[in-house]
Amino acid sequence: RPMPGSLLRDPPRPDVNGDQMYVDIGVYGLPKCVHEGREEEYDMRKSMRAVEKEIQKVDGFSMLYADIYMNKKEFETMFDHVEYRKLRSKYGAAGSFKEVFDKMNSRF
């Protein structure tokens, strides 16, 4: 089980038959059109938002080291923030250090 206050989620649990599938997908690099100087042919924000929406449909989640394009409400639906905010308050992090969402969110 994750540490109290952590945003990490429990790993998937097997069903009654002992089966469970967990898939970790990484998207790295840029399409050929970007490397060839035709950046206008690729909309990264649109592409990543489509991936995030599919992840949300299957109750999946983004890894906490990845760039994200979702809004704060979507992120907080994906990860429980109750204990996280209690710890931030207890140790004076609120107002002093960015929240995880603000570190990961790509706002370009």
Image (cartoon, rainbow, N blue to C red):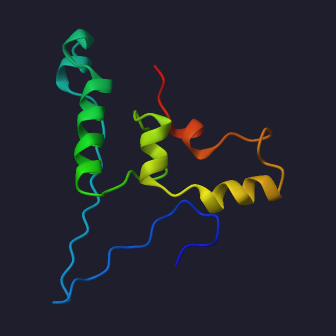
Q: Residue at x 22, y 45 (%)?
A: 54
Image coordinates of residue 25 in percent, x first then y, are: 27, 54
52 left or right of 90? left
Q: Residue 17 falls in which quadrant of the image?
A: bottom left
The answer to whether 42 is drawn above or below residue 62 in the figure is above
User: Is residue 71 in view from this perspective?
Assistant: yes
Q: Residue at x 26, y 68 (%)?
A: 22
How many numbered marks appear?
0
User: Is residue 37 in view from this perspective?
Assistant: no
In the depicted view, which residue is nearer to us: 74 or 66? 74
Image coordinates of residue 15 in percent, x first then y, are: 22, 83
34 left or right of 3? left
Image coordinates of residue 98 in percent, x first then y, are: 68, 39
The answer to whether 74 is drawn above or below residue 36 in the figure is below
Q: Residue 46 falls in which quadrant of the image?
A: top left
Residue with the most extreme bottom position? 17
Q: Residue at x 73, y 60 (%)?
A: 87
Image coordinates of residue 108 in percent, x first then y, are: 46, 19
